Image (tube, rainbow, N blue to C red):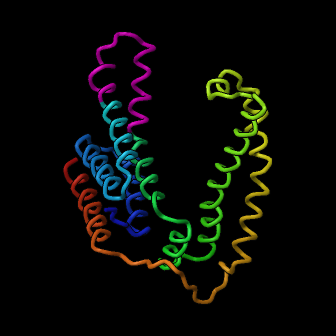
């Protein structure tokens, strides 16, 4: 059974991860937050995704604490920076993935409106939320067309031939990005998102017990982590 979280509690999780990224994060607090995110994935019905993130985290910890300190090689020691950097970024990536999982764009828009954010912020965010799925769909269409014509059939071919990748993928996506953003902006305005009147939504935006519990855990974790340092 999947437990549904309100977009606002998911937003608090993303903000908490962003704050931890900017602060000096103690290792116990880092383990606590990543483990919390794993359980959130589990409750949200994404066991496989959460397990992949959790395994990646412990692999990074294993490489940073138990392998690289004993490697007496300058070039291999540079990998320590990658291990630490990716480990610091991983909680933010996990929080963003949890926030977007099983939450429709319309639910996010309804939640932002209920928070009382001005339309000057909501409209760009609306376009941004819908922009990336459209770009991903364009990328999939381009890859399908390339494979149909026998061009860079595998992912390895894209890495071996970077100029060809730029010509067939990056340039078309950049050319369509501007038109896509303009179309999405026009569609949002036509649907009346900038109307100053009261808006209705088919989605029930309401903080439940699990949302209050999650927000409380995040607040206590932030206060406790700063107090222990």
Task: From the top left corner, tell me how far across and down residue 130 is, in percent.
Answer: 63, 61
Vertical arrangement, residue 131 with respect to residue 71, above or below: below
Residue nearest the observer in this picture, 86 or 110: 110
Left or right? Give the position of 195 relative to 179: left
The dominant secondary structure in magenta is: helix
Q: Residue at x 43, y 63 (%)?
A: 11
Residue nearest the observer in this picture, 167 or 147: 147
Task: From the top left corner, tell me how far across and down residue 91 is, in percent.
Answer: 38, 46
Q: Residue at x 72, y 31 (%)?
A: 165
Which image quadrant is residue 213 in?
A: bottom left
Residue nearest the observer in this picture, 109 or 45: 45
Q: Which residues are magenta?
A: 62-87
Left or right? Give the position of 51 relative to 184: left
Left or right? Give the position of 19 relative to 215: right
| Residue extending farthest top | 72
* Magenta stretch encompasses residue 82: yes
Which image quadrant: the N terminus? Answer: bottom left
Q: Residue at x 40, y 18 (%)?
A: 77
Which image quadrant is residue 45 in?
A: bottom left
| Residue extending farthest front | 148
Q: Residue at x 63, y 73 (%)?
A: 120
* Magenta stretch encompasses residue 212: no
Task: From the top left corner, tell me how far across and down residue 29 is, in percent.
Answer: 25, 47
Vertical arrangement, residue 28 with respect to residue 85, above or below: below
């Amino acid at each position: 059974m999947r437990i549904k979280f309100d977009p606002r509690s998911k937003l608090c999780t993303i903000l908490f991860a962003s704050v931890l990224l900017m602060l000096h994060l103690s290792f116990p607090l880092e383990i606590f937050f990543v483990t919390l995110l794993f359980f959130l994935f589990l409750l949200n019905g994404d066991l496989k995704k959460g397990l992949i993130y959790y395994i990646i985290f412990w692999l990074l910890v294993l490489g940073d604490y138990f392998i690289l300190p004993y490697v007496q090689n300058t070039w291999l020691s540079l990998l320590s920076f990658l291990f630490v950097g990716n480990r610091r970024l991983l909680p933010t990536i996990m929080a963003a993935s949890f926030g977007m999982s099983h939450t429709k764009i319309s639910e996010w828009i309804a939640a932002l409106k209920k928070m009382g954010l001005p339309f000057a912020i909501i409209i760009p965010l609306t376009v941004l939320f819908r922009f990336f799925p459209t770009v991903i769909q364009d990328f999939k269409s381009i890859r399908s067309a390339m494979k149909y014509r026998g061009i860079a059939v595998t992912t390895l071919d894209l890495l071996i031939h970077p100029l060809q990748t730029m010509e067939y993928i990056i340039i078309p996506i950049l050319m369509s990005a501007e038109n896509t953003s303009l179309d999405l902006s026009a569609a949002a305005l036509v649907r009346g998102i900038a109307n100053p009147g009261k808006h209705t939504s088919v989605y029930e935006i309401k903080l439940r017990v699990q949302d209050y519990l999650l927000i409380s855990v995040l607040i206590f974790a932030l206060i406790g982590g700063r107090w222990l340092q």
